[in-house]
Amino acid sequence: MGEILLTEDEIDRYARQLVLRDIGLRGQERLKSSRVAILGMGGLGTPAALLLTRMGIGFIRIVDRDIVSGTDLHRQVLFNLDDVGLPKVEAAKTSLNKMNPDVEIDAIAIPILNENIDKLIEDVDLIIDGLDNIRTRYIINRAALRMGKPYIFSAAVEMFGIVSTIIPGETPCLECFYSGLQDEFLPRCAVVGVHPSITFITSAIAVSEATKLIVSGEPGLKGKLLFIDLRSMDFNLLELKRDENCGVCGRGVAPEIEQPLVELGCARDGKSVYFINKFIDGFNMDEAVTNILKIGSITRMGDQFIKFKIDESLQGTLFKSGSMIIEVSGMATLNEREIIGIYESISNVKIYR
């Protein structure tokens, strides 16, 4: 990193960090010159973005495929009632810019897939996990290893949290200690719940690890896994060992990561939610506007999205990335072919040929 001097305003703003022996003047300059990707803007990602923005990280890329819902508001700290229905990354960027306009926020509304993950992390120094599913974490783990990017893994549900700092070539990778898991067999917030405190604590520890990596290169959870149990107030630390037969960083064969095109999300706000996990570089939003108006109406538009309504029970959000969310109210349901049919009629992209 080249030397970057702080302005007088920055010295005043970060005064309580500058006197920390763990950061100091040089450390603050390193924070200012660093680039971080936070993948997922939910209960873990939003506190991480808030803290890193207030601390003066120079560049933060925030990535999420979803929109803000009412069920998010009890724990996802960057959103309020006015944000419901907006893409999470757009609402988050607006909030973060007000906190610290000197931090560059790169907001990308997109599903994280094998075909786009390299582009999302190629120009950052490290990755912070703000996700809610293991499938996408496996995609990130493999890309981080492939590109030599430190990856701070974190997860939280109910009253429990876990954090580990993964450094390619130095520590076990995620699939050394959490391999072969499937999301359908893991607890979900919509079923077992999540206490806001555990998302904050877990995220704060991940941010602490990130700043240690940036400032000194010596994170406390390198090659370790921290278990947090708020119910019993136990914090347990486990030493990790690399699995020589790991299919990702060892001599084993990595299993293929399935990427469903249509994914049923957790119901929220009285609606069934379907994600169309499609990525199209150069997607034609103008053409999509014309197609939407043939079958329904547009209720809101932004730089990266179009919200539309087809009838009283069916509405959706189309993103500039080519992905889509469809929400169905009441008892109505859609099968995969019906969902794809809606997507094709709006996007002019043929899935079934």
Image: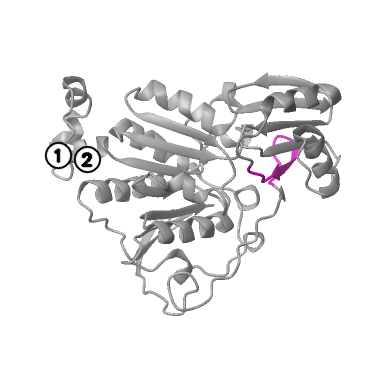
Q: Main secondary structure of the magenta part?
A: loop
Do the residues bearing badges 1 and 2 touch, measured as CB atoms within 8 Å?
A: yes
Q: Is residue 201 above or below residue 153?
A: above
Using residue 109 as the reference point, say whether residue 327 is left or right of it. Answer: right
**Residues rendered magenta in the picture:** 265-279
Looking at this view, is 257 or 199 the one in front?
257
**Does residue 273 belong to the magenta stretch?**
yes
Residue 83: quadrant of the picture: top right
| Quadrant location, the N terminus | top left
> Residue 89, how many percent across, how many down?
52, 33
Instruction: Tell me if residue 138 can be seen.
Output: yes
Alpha-carbon neighbours of circle 2 within 10 Å: few (<14), some, or many (≥20)? many
Which residue is found at the position 61% from the left and 61% from the top?
186
Q: Is residue 109 above or below residue 221?
A: above
The amino acid sitting under disc 1 is Arg
Residue 26, which numbered label? 1
> Residue 175, how many percent across, how many down?
48, 68
The residue carrying mark 2 is 30
Using residue 169 as the reference point, say whether residue 64 is left or right of it. Answer: right
Looking at this view, is 7 or 269 the one in front?
7
Which element type, helix, strand or loop, lies under badge 2?
A: helix
Residue 181: quadrant of the picture: bottom right
Give the distance between the C-alpha atoms of the residues marked 1 and 2, in whole angstroms: 6 Å
> Residue 255, how many percent across, how many down?
58, 70
> Residue 281, how many percent across, how many down?
60, 39
Alpha-carbon neighbours of circle 1 within 10 Å: few (<14), some, or many (≥20)? some
Looking at this view, is 67 or 34 the one in front?
34
Which element type, helix, strand or loop, lies under badge 1?
A: helix
The amino acid sitting under disc 2 is Arg
Which residue is found at the position 36% from the left and 71% from the top?
240
